Image (cartoon, rainbow, N blue to C red):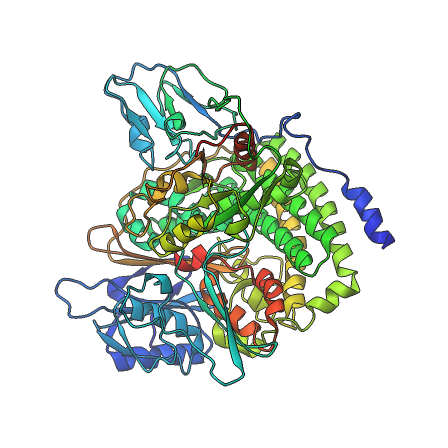
Amino acid sequence: MFGILKERLHQKYRTLDYPAKEPFLPPHFKGRPSIAPCSAGDCRVCQEVCPTGAVSRDAGGHILLDLGRCIFCGLCEESCPEHAIAFSRTYRLAARTREELIVRQGEENRTEPSRNTTKGRALFSKSLTFRQVSAGGCAACEADTNVLNTLLYDLGRFGISFAASPRHADGLVVTGPVTTAMQRALVDTYLALPAPRLLVALGTCAISRGLFADSPECLGIPDDMKIDLYIPGCPPNPWTILDGFLSLQQSPVRN
Amino acid sequence: MQNIPSFSYLHTCSLDSLPRENEATFLALLGQALKEGARPLAYFALPKMADETGQSLLAVLAQDGQRRLLALRSIPLTSVASLTPSFPALHLFERALNEEGMELRGHPWCKPVRVAPDLRSPGSPPFPFFRTTGSQVHEVAVGPVHAGIIEPGHFRFQCAGEEVIHLEIALGYQHRGLEALVLKKPLETLPMLFECTAGDTSIGHALAHALIIERLQNRSLSARVSETRALALELERLANHVGDLGAIAGDTGFLPTSAWNGRIRGDILTMTAILTGNRFGRNLVVPGTVRRSPDAKTCSDLEERRKTALRDARGAIDCMMKSPSVLERMRETGKVSAGMAKKLGLVGVCARASGIPVDARKNAPFEDETLPFAPALAETGDVLGRVQVRIREVETSFAMVEKSLTILSALEREPVPPRPPLRPLPKNTLAVSQVEGFRGEIVHVAVTNAENAFLTYRVIDPSFHNWMGLAVALRGNQISDFPLCNKSFNLSYCGHDL
């Protein structure tokens, strides 16, 4: 008993006063990228090295980087001869629409995607309960969601928790590219949530199937399941996930 | 075993040098090798060639003591007799063969491996679940969606009263078609794909793949590259072992260690993130080199963090291991005997906890060298044994991290070699890699064709062998012992399902 108390004193209080204090991010952390104007011409290096086809060009020849497909490997940044693409340290990446995940060349380097800040009753501001379904996830997104329950993040203090039953949940968090074998279980779980239900696509696989987009075994989240929050990353950093969850508490639900 | 072609684990083997044995000779040689103590690493069928009537079988075995590999190849076959009744370690390999179209004669347990029960179309015969029958037997089914933030799988506890007679596990829900994707993707993309094989083993699988390419292309590595990889692999082991010990403490109801270890695991993941930019070590290991290697300043930062994490982990683990109630809960729970572990071909922590000294760091180190540690062993084979093995490995890994950091600081002047251009793969060659991930031995096997491309690429995650160990461990226990047993095995669903 005394041994445990002594050790407790040594292990200290470790919860970060978030969001008042900013979290530690490692030196090579890759957050929201920006794309400076480049003399592109026929250069297609950034598109060619991208393993998931996240880099493309619009009709005007401007480079687009789709964070919903990006696995943050940094090959485009490394290979660009003009260093036009640069990943910043901005970890706030979650977005309410698919469109907001597209980073456009030359656009102002936003610190974070715009949030739906419409004044209204923030339905889940004090309590938000999720159910999670892993559907082909490699366990990295799952691990970095689970870690939110550890001392540093202490998810519970924000009134956010994960429930065992979909009946007790306000929203469903999906990870993975949705394998054929999991599609039915995913839809069944989703429908078991009482409406209005939120849907969170967590990680690049859930958003776009990522590296598994060309596998016939991976179907993606069905089109008729409306996604309320996209959290990009492979896997997203826990702070990115937490920031995304908190953004849901700050604005009213659409459906 | 003079009749079986063998090669050093560091080298590749020409496919044409393997005689194409008929079924009887193939099985006799395979049986003889297993009987003499060789360990099956992989057993699969090569894709059917246009001019062939069936698929040729390929078996790769390890002679751990000699650090040599054995390879056996058959003529094209459509049907083969099962060796599972004599050598149960082959049971899942044979089931996978059957799933890929080979008829298995006499397999006692020939169920699907990666075709989940949910994929049965209406009207097709029911999934062949193993069932325990009897008037007093009841069955409790859970999954594929579980109650926590965890991967999907289907479990059926078959019980008489409180006692679990057998745990039937049906997987395949995570099947993403990974091995097929390997053949489709450009070689440059494969490191990233393998980092997603099992997310918590990103380094382990990326390393196993890099070794395959390096062995096929006969590349040697600089000291800086080897040491950076060794550092990353041990950090991955540390983070997972510390996390697992905390999770086990949590399931015994001992919350202090559960809470502390969750945080200490995070501190170790932060070390990996300082090394690579990513908590799971993504974007580090590529064939021929590493994309980053720490400079002396980073090494000293990591060394400070290592010391702190070591002190914190020791303190947290000591509290748990001094608690009589924790020890009593773990003792005799989820027991796998040495004989059973050997029979089932268990690997990694689960095998070592039953006294089986398999450790790829010892049997197949990255370079042919003698490592200064012996595999951590326990004798009891219960949850406590698996905990003790992890605790010893945490100590060893902290020491190995210290050693790597010292070497890397001294190598500061040696540059990190740039990513080498990918040369074409050699034709008709078999390459094998073994990497001791935190769960156990990861095996990758590649066979190239006459067009300098992969003919087939096989991934054997340690979970592939060990799921059956969990099923057996639960026999004679209660359903309430499952969470604790499950955490002590901590197996990967996606690593198994691919």
Quadrant containing the C terminus of chain B in the rendered view: bottom left
Q: Can residue B227 be seen in this snapshot?
A: no
Task: Measuring from the top left, give residue B130's x and y in whole percent.
Answer: 42, 76
**In the image as oriented, which residue stretches furthest toward the left?**
B51
Q: Can residue B7 be seen in this snapshot?
A: yes
**In the image as oriented, which residue stretches furthest toward the bottom?**
B135
Q: Which residue is at the front of the view, B421 or B81?
A: B81
- State the residue at coordinates (67%, 37%): A157
Q: Which residue is at the front of the view, B435 or B236?
A: B236
Number of disc labels: 0
Task: Measuring from the top left, give residue B471's x and y in whole percent.
Answer: 51, 71
Q: Using the image, determine if residue B227 lies above or below residue B319.
A: above
Q: Quick check: B122 left or right of B229?
A: left
- State the residue at coordinates (15%, 70%): B53
Task: Measuring from the top left, give residue B212's x and y in whole percent.
Answer: 38, 52
Quadrant location of residue B356?
Answer: bottom right
Quadrant containing the N terminus of chain B in the rendered view: bottom left
Q: Which residue is at the front of the view, B282 or B372?
A: B282
Task: Measuring from the top left, give residue B199's x and y in whole percent.
Answer: 48, 48
Q: Which residue is at the front of the view, B13 or A62?
A: A62
